[in-house]
Amino acid sequence: MKTTELSKKLLASLFALTLAGAPAIFAPTPVEAHLLSCNQERGIGTRVYNKAVKGHTVHPATGDVAAIQDRLVECNSSRLNLKDNSHRRYLARTVIDESVNYPNAFMAPGGISVVYAKQIEIDRKYDRAARIQDDVERPLDAVNYSAQSVCASTLAHEYGHYANEDFLRMADRHVAMSIALACIPTPTSIAVAASAGTAAGNILVIRQESFAAEAGADATALDFLDNVPEYSMGSAITSFRHLQKYLRSTNQKDSGGFRNFIQAHSHTDKRIERIRTHIADVSNGRVQLAEDGRLTVDGNLVCGTGRLMDADRADGRERTDYLAGQIASCMARHIWKPEHLRAMKESEYVRGGSSDHTVFVACENAGASEGYGKIAKVLGTFDYPIGVADRLLTTAQRKAKAELQAVWELTRTLHARMNA
Ligand SMILES: [Zn+2]
């Protein structure tokens, strides 16, 4: 294949250049912002991809996973695009690898991303049982937007590598020619990186570059989630926690050590910590998610305990992570105010939704004066039917309603404090 030949030559020349330590010779030309053209980047990416999935059962994502990719692209159109014949650089449809039995995902150069089926499996889990194997998997349809949001956080991280042009920038600096940026370092991903031309002498540099790229992709992923109404920055925490639970269940160490040497990722705890800090930052310190998962908004513990439970539900921690990210987003948009919030039947919010469930949303407009306008952020689903008299509700439904009202009340605490 022509592109393969070309990338081989490029690899050879750039690699030689790295070793010779003469980076100035290949200065970017005026027409290209980067050393590699989009076609060359894709050519190298194809090669890396082919190596990484050789002998595996793979297929382009379809159905719900493809819909999540589309949603991320559509709501982040200034930074993400699929092939549309107007952009030279574009994301390929994410590929699902069914053959690998552990969770991971990676972005090869040229927008070619691969997610292992096992990663989607753990993103789909409820976080209820002690072992992740015992947790229930949810569908990824629109009713299960919370599970979608967790899966979206995995995809968004990979798309973050693409949007941040990590590979192009690395290539510009003649450092690492073919690193598939993997979410979790594995023998396979290290082998791919190594066989693609990593020299022992450069590993330290690559490791440093890689750390920066990973933290950058995590940060960009939060922006991507933030821009989709039904996806929450908090879901990135849930995804990482599921990963920790998986590693514990399978007696594996979290990051560190040799496995993390080339494909540098911080320990998952640290990545979670950075998300919590980001949520606090975008909310001006008003949303605080503690290490134990308790949520404080304007100094008040949510529902008195810091956790959403909903009487019949056991996914309190995930719902609380989700809510934390969404409240912070609302604050950044200046819509964390009672007049922007609206409770609606789940069946009205989404096709296939139940009229016994209520979805709580924040809208662009203050409803009283101008109508609510578009839904800006979804805050959560509560298991009670809106518009039904309290005496007709079950005990569990009454608790769910009280929970929603407690969240709504949180919008008033800042005002109340100012008036005091
Ligand atoms: Zn990564």
Image (cartoon, helix red, strand yellow):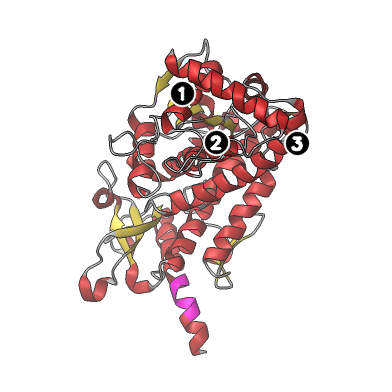
Q: Residue 142, image x and y in percent?
A: 33, 41
Q: Amino acid at mark 2?
A: Phe
Residue at 45 percent across and 19 percent down: it is 3
Per the model, the C-alpha gap separating discs 3 and 2 is: 17 Å
Q: Which mark is residue 167?
A: 2
Q: Please provide the residue range marked out in magenta.
A: 410-414
Residue at 72 percent across and 28 percent down: it is 19
Q: Amino acid at mark 1?
A: Gly
Residue named by callout 3: 204
Q: Amino acid at mark 3?
A: Leu
Q: Is residue 290 magenta?
A: no
State the SS at label 1. Answer: helix
Residue at 42 percent across and 68 percent down: it is 408
**Which quadrant holds the N terminus?**
top left
Residue 274 horizontal side relative to residue 358, left or right: right
Which residue, as the protein is rendered here, is positioned at the far left?
370
Q: Main secondary structure of the magenta part?
A: helix
Query: Which mark sits nearer the N-terminus, 3 or 1?
Result: 1
- Total numbered circles: 3
Q: Is residue 412 magenta?
A: yes
Q: Residue 323, image x and y in percent?
A: 48, 57
Front-lying residue, 212 or 121:
212
Query: Which mark sits nearer the N-terminus, 2 or 1?
Result: 1
Question: In which quarter of the view is residue 59 placed?
Answer: top left
- Asked if the residues shown at circle 3 and circle 1 are in contact, with their CB atoms under 8 angstroms apart, the answer is no
Within-10-Å neighbours for mark 2: few <14, some 14–19, many 20+: many
Q: Quadrant of ligand 1?
A: top right
State the SS at label 2. Answer: helix
Per the model, the C-alpha gap separating discs 3 and 1 is: 26 Å
State the SS at label 3. Answer: helix
Within-10-Å neighbours for mark 1: few <14, some 14–19, many 20+: many
